[in-house]
Structures are given as C-alpha cells and as structure tokens.
Amino acid sequence: MTGLVALLMALATGTAAAQEHAPASRSNEIDIVAHLGNSHAIELPSWKAPYYVEVELPRFAPIHVGGVTIDLSPTKHAVFLALAGALVALVFLYTARVVARAQAAGRPPRGFAAAMEAMVLYIRQEVILANVGPHGEGYVNYLLTVFFFILACNLLGLLPWSATPTSNIAVTGAMAGVSLVVIEISGMRALGLKGYLGTIFFLPEGLPTLLKPVMLVIMTPIEIIGKLAKPFALAVRLFANMTAGHVVVLALIGLTFFFQSYLVGVAASVMATGIMLLELFVAFLQAFVFTLLTSVFIGLMRAAH
C-alpha cells in the first residue's frame, strides 16, 4: 500500500513538473481522472498530438421525480456498456449460426466458433451446474450472459482510447444487485415462502420457547447482513481489481515524467507492459470469479440446510 501511494505521488508530482515545461495544449496528456472516471465525452483516435479528440455525448434534460433528479444522458461508461452488450450478442449470433451449420453437416465446428463453444461448455458444466446443483439449467442463460458481458467490459478497457465500465462502482453494484435478486428469488422458488423466511428468521429445531425471541433478536440482523454482504463482495471485488491495474500502469508511466530519464522510461514501460499482460489475465479471472460466486450463492440459497 505504501509503495502504491508513493507511485501515485510520483505520478502527480511528475505530471505537474512536466506541465510546467510543456505547452498549454499538452497539459492534459496524462489525466488519470479522465481515464478512470466517467464523463459525458468519449475519446476518438487522432493523428495529431495528443492523438485523441474528445467528442461530447448528447445531453438530455433531467427528469424530476419528487425530490429526486434523474439524469438519463449517456456517459462514457454507458456507451461502452452498450458496446460490450452488442459485441456479446454479435459474437454469439455468429457462433450459434456456425455451430448449427456444422451440426447439420455432421461435423464439429472449427476455428473461433469452436473456441467459443468450448468456453461455453466449460463454464456451463464445470462452474454453473456444478455449483447451482441439480435442476440448475434455468440459471445457465443468465450466468453465461454475466460471464461474457463482464469479460467484454474488462477487455474493452484494455484497448486504447477506451474505458472500463467495470471500474465504475455503480456498474458493478448494479450487476451485483441483479445477482442478489436472482439469488433471493431462486431461494423462494426452491424453498417456498416458509423455507425462505427461515433463511432470515432463523430458529433451530428443538430450541426452548423462552430462547426463541432471543435467537431472533440476535440472528435476524446477522442473516440480513449476510445476504447483503454477498452482493457487496461481488461489486467491490470486481470494481477494485479492474481499477487497481489501471492505477498501477498509469503510476509506472508517470515515473518517466517524474525522473525524465530514458533508462527509467524503458524500465517503466517494460513493467507497465507486464502489468498489462497481467490485466489481460485478470479480465478473464474476474469474470470467472463473479460467475462462480454467483453460482455458489444460488446453490447455497436453493439448499439452505
């Protein structure tokens, strides 16, 4: 933690020092907040320095509901969320068509479609059904969508002039919230209303009558906190991991501007490249972990005992 703070301070100091000796037009070449944060503009590649142009997204009049103001204007992360969804849809429409043609011809699919089919089968058989439990086919479509959507969002964030929607806690929180709804509804369907209420108001069998109110007072808040802790862990884990890698890369690159040395620049670039390769692995890992934990939580809720 101390090392990361030192790197960030070096980046901030180095950026300020570089800006003192640079033209005003180049003062925003390194902007951590713009890269990691959300905004109402997206960056498009350009052949002229600073090699990108900002394009403002349309702004809509906010909607007022009582004392709450809702702004539905698109943001950078919203654009990349839509792009990730479109990419996942196109990839699997193409894969489904190729697999259907191959099966009709009596041969296995080849190339990219075969790789996607293998990945789908692995996630389905070894992650989803293995953890959701018997009769878990109804959750396969949702969990496969979660995996590939998160993966697409993570991978888009590794491209130049892009953004990582999963580095936004609002995005990961919304996805975790949807997972919470699916988990709780799965419990209601599997256990019935009485059995589901038993996961909140816990009373062991054979407990003396006088101890039942005491047990309810102690265990009910714990059970509710346990239910809320699951989506909280899902949201924070994905958000923190996708943000941390970008911060480290930017901090390493900032060392070049701080020391203003070719040797430091080469070393920092090599280390940043290594972190980017690690980020590629983390992009797959975090999609896998989110899907795995959601599957485990659904399986635990469906078999509360």
Image (cartoon, rainbow, N blue to C red):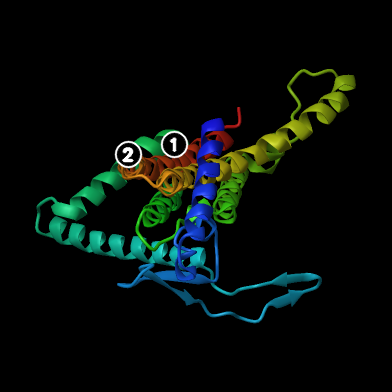
Count of numbered circles on the image? 2
Residue at 58% from the left image edge and 75% from the top image edge:
73
Helix, strand or loop under label 2: helix
Horizontal placement of 267 versus 239: left or right?
Answer: left
The residue to which callout 1 is attached is: 134
Quarter of the image that includes the C terminus? top right
Residue 69 versus residue 267 in the image, above or below:
below
Quadrant (top left/top right/bottom left/bottom right) for the N terminus: top right
Question: Residue type at mark 1?
Answer: Pro
Q: CA distance from mark 2 to mark 1?
A: 52 Å
Residue 182 is situated, as x and y percent measured from the top left of the image, at 56, 49
Residue 267's disc is 2
Q: Residue at x 77, y 18 (%)?
A: 206
Dots 2, 1 in contact, CB < 8 A: no
Q: Nearer the viewer, residue 14 or 56?
A: 14
Q: Secondary structure at mark 1?
A: loop
Task: Estimate the x, y position of residue 207 in percent, counting from the top left.
Answer: 80, 19
Image spot of residue 201 (x, y percent)? 76, 34
Give the side of residue 18 with respect to residue 97, left or right. right
Identify which amino acid the numbered label 2 is placed on.
Ala
- In this rendering, the answer to whether 200 lies above or below 104 is above
- Which residue is painted at 50% across and 67% down in the image? 76
